[in-house]
Image (tube, rainbow, N blue to C red):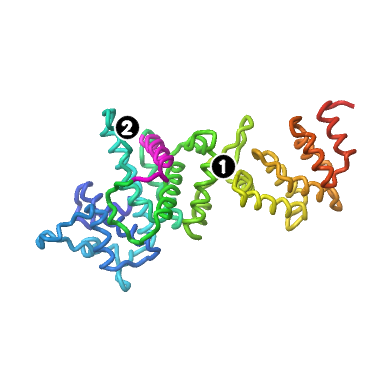
């Protein structure tokens, strides 16, 4: 690794532990910069942040002989240049170091859990994620795109068995991420004073990125958020991220975290990683699976736009309606109005619409109510009778 080679040269060929200590210190500098959204950091900021993370915030202020000049210690190597403060010689140094420090905290999490083993208290006690929380709760890694790429590269050097253990630990942490943890270490490390909500959003988003990065295969949301309400919990997380991470953090996360909807045996899920996302399908998932009134209003606005033919070709609108019909529990009155408007549109492909109408009439339990709403929306009863006969006698003459 290039940066490790540089560090070894600068520390006079010191052993690996000393090199890692140096990288932790440099990573803390990079993390302080990232949290502040700045490429430059001052001596005062370093003297406040570094002991809080690298020394547990327990520097003995009374012993003058033992006092550490943290800013000088961190920036005396050749990695830095002076620019009204300290800046890395190359910006990607900082992004790599944040990724390295994140992986260091993840490996520390795995090491602590393995050392605890099967001890009775270890089985019931929470995993000690204090360092990982301190490192990943101030900003989303995806805010700086290269940082996620460096995480992936560093994970390639980690044995598969360790990655699998880490992915399992991270999933457990994600399930508990939004619950209160009254006691933590490293609480003095606060480069920026964010709200608790903002920090929990960054932490849970980074946990999700790390789970996907550490996993060999694409990850189903239902596997990391098990239970019948997995999509509701996923929706709550994504709305938290969008509302709290800021424009750069949210845009970076959407870019870095591939997601697409799947339906298996009638059960809907979201798969993270792997195949390229469909884009519009993800919008459908975000809107159509919401249960709050504002989500339904958004769905109605979307359907109204589809019915009125705004901005999208007819075939694309049919495709979106088909996606909505396959989505669990989407039977908005606006769906019937959209189909009615499209049926009477000049040049409408009614054969394609009939396939959608057939899907809507397939369930005997709500066929009568659906029929009445479709007629009110302008679909001729003769067309519905034809579709109904096809449902009752598929392939018949």
Viewer can see residue 158 = yes
Going by the image, does 237 lie left or right of 340?
Answer: left
Name the residue at 81% across, 49% down: 342
Question: What's the residue at 34%, 51% (across, down)?
Answer: 135
Q: What label sits on residue 83 in the rendered view?
A: none
Left or right: where does residue 98 sit relative to residue 215? Answer: left
Q: Quadrant of residue 77?
A: bottom left
Which residue is labeled 2 in the image? Answer: 124
Q: Eyeballing the image, is 374 above or below 73? A: above
Q: 10 Å neighbourhood of mark 2: few (<14), some, or many (≥20)?
A: few
In the image, what residue occupies the spot 37% across and 51% down? 136
Per the rendered image, the range of residues in magenta is 162-181
Q: Is residue 96 above or below residue 104?
A: below
Is 272 or 153 nearer to us in this picture?
272
Callout 1: SS: loop
Mark 2 falls on what kind of element? Answer: helix
Q: CA distance from mark 2 to mark 1?
A: 37 Å
Residue 27 placed where, x, y %?
A: 31, 55
Q: Is residue 365 above or below residue 16?
A: above
Quarter of the rendering containing residue 72: bottom left
Residue 75 in which image quadrant: bottom left
Q: Quadrant of the C terminus?
A: top right
Residue 244 is a magenta residue? no
Check disc 1 and report the residue beneath it.
Answer: 275
Q: Tell me residue 197's x, y (percent).
A: 43, 53
């Amino acid at each position: 690794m290039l940066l490790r080679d540089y560090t070894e040269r600068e520390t006079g060929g010191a052993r690996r532990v000393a090199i890692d200590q140096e990288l932790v210190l440099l990573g803390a500098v990079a993390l302080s910069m990232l949290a502040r959204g700045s490429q430059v950091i001052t001596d005062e900021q370093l003297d406040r942040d570094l002991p809080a993370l690298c020394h547990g915030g327990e520097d003995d202020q009374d012993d003058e002989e033992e006092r550490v000049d943290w800013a000088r210690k961190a920036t005396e190597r050749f990695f830095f240049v002076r620019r009204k403060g300290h800046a890395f010689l190359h910006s990607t140094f900082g992004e790599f170091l944040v990724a390295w420090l994140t992986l260091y905290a993840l490996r520390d999490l795995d090491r602590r859990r393995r050392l605890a083993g099967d001890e009775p208290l270890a089985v019931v006690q929470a995993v000690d994620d204090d360092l990982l929380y301190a490192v990943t709760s101030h900003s989303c890694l995806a805010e700086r795109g290269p940082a996620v790429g460096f995480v992936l590269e560093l994970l390639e050097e980690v044995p598969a068995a360790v990655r699998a253990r880490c992915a399992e630990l991270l999933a457990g942490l994600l399930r508990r991420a939004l619950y209160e943890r009254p006691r933590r270490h490293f609480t003095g490390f606060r480069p920026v004073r964010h709200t608790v909500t903002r920090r929990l959003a960054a932490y849970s988003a980074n946990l999700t990125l790390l789970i996907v990065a550490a996993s060999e295969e694409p990850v189903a949301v239902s596997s990391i958020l098990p239970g019948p309400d997995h999509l509701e919990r996923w929706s709550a997380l994504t709305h938290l991220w969008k509302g709290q991470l800021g424009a750069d953090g949210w845009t970076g996360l959407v870019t870095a975290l591939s997601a697409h909807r799947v339906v298996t045996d009638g059960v809907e899920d979201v798969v993270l990683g792997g195949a390229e996302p469909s884009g519009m399908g993800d919008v459908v998932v975000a809107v159509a699976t919401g249960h709050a009134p504002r989500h339904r209003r958004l769905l109605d606005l979307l359907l109204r736009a589809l019915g009125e033919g705004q901005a999208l070709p007819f075939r694309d609108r049919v495709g979106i309606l088909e996606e909505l019909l396959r989505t669990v529990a989407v039977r908005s009155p606006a769906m019937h109005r959209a189909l009615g408007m499209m049926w009477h549109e000049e040049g409408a492909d009614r054969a394609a619409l009939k396939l959608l109408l057939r899907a809507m009439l397939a369930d005997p339990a709500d066929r009568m109510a659906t029929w009445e709403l479709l007629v009110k929306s302008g679909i001729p009863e003769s067309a519905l009778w034809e579709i109904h006969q096809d449902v009752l006698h598929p392939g018949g003459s």
